[in-house]
Amino acid sequence: MERHLMKDRQPKPNTTLQFLLPEYVLDFGYVIPAIPHSHSVNVTNTGTVAVSFKASVKPLAGTGFSTDFKRVKNLPCGETQTFTVKFDPQTADLKMGDTSVVMPIQVVGGPTVQVRLCALVTEPAVTVSTDTLQFDTVQCGMCQMRTIQLFNHKSVPGFWSIAEKGKPIKKHQKDLQIQQPPAVVFKMIPGEQVHVQIKFNPAEGSSYNRQLHVCVAESSQQLFITAQGRAEEPHLEFCPSVLELGPCLPLNTDVEVNVTVRNPCPFPVEFYSLELDTQYSEEEKILRLVKGYGENRILLLPPRAPGESLPQELLEYYQEHGSQLKDDGLKQGLDEDEAVMVDTYEERDRKVEEMHSFSLKPAELLVSEMTVVGNSQALGQLEMTPVSRVIARHMRVDLSPEGLAARNRRGIAIIVYGAPLTDNGSCVAALARHYGGVSLSVDAVVTEVLVNGTSPISQTATQPYDCAATR
């Protein structure tokens, strides 16, 4: 009898230690190998007594996950303990793809809490519409542009830049080496498409073969674009190349020598005398006035055939500028002495011509700027300069307010309709967030027109309600 009582007094095993609670998931999402991630985890005692617990970190070995979790003793009721979980794929040499591991947390005298740590290891990358750009034969002094498309097909943003692949430097060029400016870095969100224009602007006649390197930050992708083109340099042949004039007496008949100029190029070439050509001097004045020069002091204009003048937009701008200077000169003369009048147009033109040579910088103030506000995907802000109007006409782009408004109105209109109480509002809100558009409700628009509308249509629609209200 005593032996049986001793057996009954032995403690029974705690079956709660064998219970496994549902998993908690700590998802790191998309992780780039070169960028470690960390998350803070809060453990709160929601019970009525103090608890002690510890985590088993052995399953985390070789997975890239690590934690500073230590054993916690007697955590009071309602108190919170915070620990940090880090994930560094490079420490474990993980491959691209999903990875997960379970970290058990054992509660002393209680069940085991399982925390699943998971992440998706990936790297930024982009795709290019073509890996070869073939330019036409371009004359020196002109340029040609080709457009490529970059697409971010990954689920993480990508920071990319494009530059010409570096070439080895010869020994005699090391002393003359010029440090190139850093490449401009652009950001592409997941699913974004970007159009990039590559310009071929040769300086001398030869064949060109260059490689452009598209570099994506934190990516092992090697992306190269081969650009090929040929340039022709205009040149003339003079016969004779050296002029030898015979002897002549002072104040006697001039000596003339005939010179033959031959164009060996397959395209027409225009040439002129810098000392005698007045049209060249006039065009230089016009080109000094206009805005739109790039960093290398290069102004891009549509190509013109030999013998043609500058575009009409530039000539009109120059005439307006001359008229403005003429009016300013007259006003200044009248303010100085109201009794003195300008007698002849020749004197007036002479003053205008003198002012032309000193008005290069103030001419920028005469250019009016038009701001066209569009949506985030529209044209944004445009500066309406003579150069922009010339290029727009050459590319057949309508820069009038009506044309710009038509471009900004391009898009899609989605109409969501259905039976009452089918929750159309949540569907409309989700579509508006996804496409970045504006959601409109037919009931709200009609109500706004009836209450605050001032157009003839709104007044006609409001009359039945006013009549009903008076009754």
Image (spheres, rainbow, N blue to C red):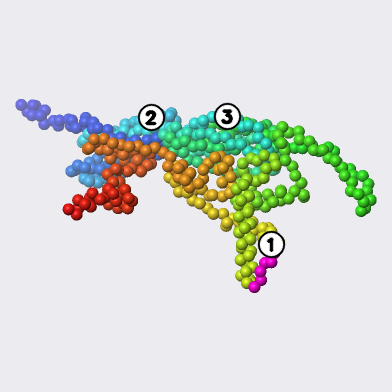
Return the x and y of residue 322 as percentages of the image width and height. 63, 57
Q: Give the structural element (helix, strand or loop) at label 2.
A: strand
Q: Which mark is on residue 213?
A: none
Residue at 17% in and 53% down: 471
Q: Nearer the viewer, residue 181 or 1?
A: 181
**Is the Cβ of the residue at disc 2 closer than 8 Å to that at disc 3?**
no
* Foreground disc of the pair 2, 1: 1
Residue type at mark 3: give it. Thr
**Residue tagged 2:** 98
**Residue tagged 1:** 345
Return the x and y of residue 318 as percentages of the image width and height. 63, 53
Residue 199 as seen in the image, left or right of residue 437: right
Indicate whether 450 appears above or below 56.
below
Q: Give the structural element (helix, strand or loop) at label 3.
A: strand
Residue at 56% in and 31% down: 224
Q: How dense is the environment of label 3, judged by Cα within 10 Å: few (below 14), some, or many (20 and up)? A: some
* Foreground disc of the pair 2, 3: 3
Residue 66 as seen in the image, left or right of residue 134: left
Residue type at mark 2: give it. Asp
Residue 235 visible in the shown view: yes
Q: Main secondary structure of the magenta part?
A: loop
**Residue tagged 3:** 132
State the extent of the magenta-drawn residues as a range. Answer: 339-344
Residue 311 as seen in the image, left or right of residue 73: right
Return the x and y of residue 120 as percentages of the image width and height. 39, 32
Spatial CA span between label 2 and label 1: 84 Å
Spatial CA span between label 2 and label 3: 35 Å
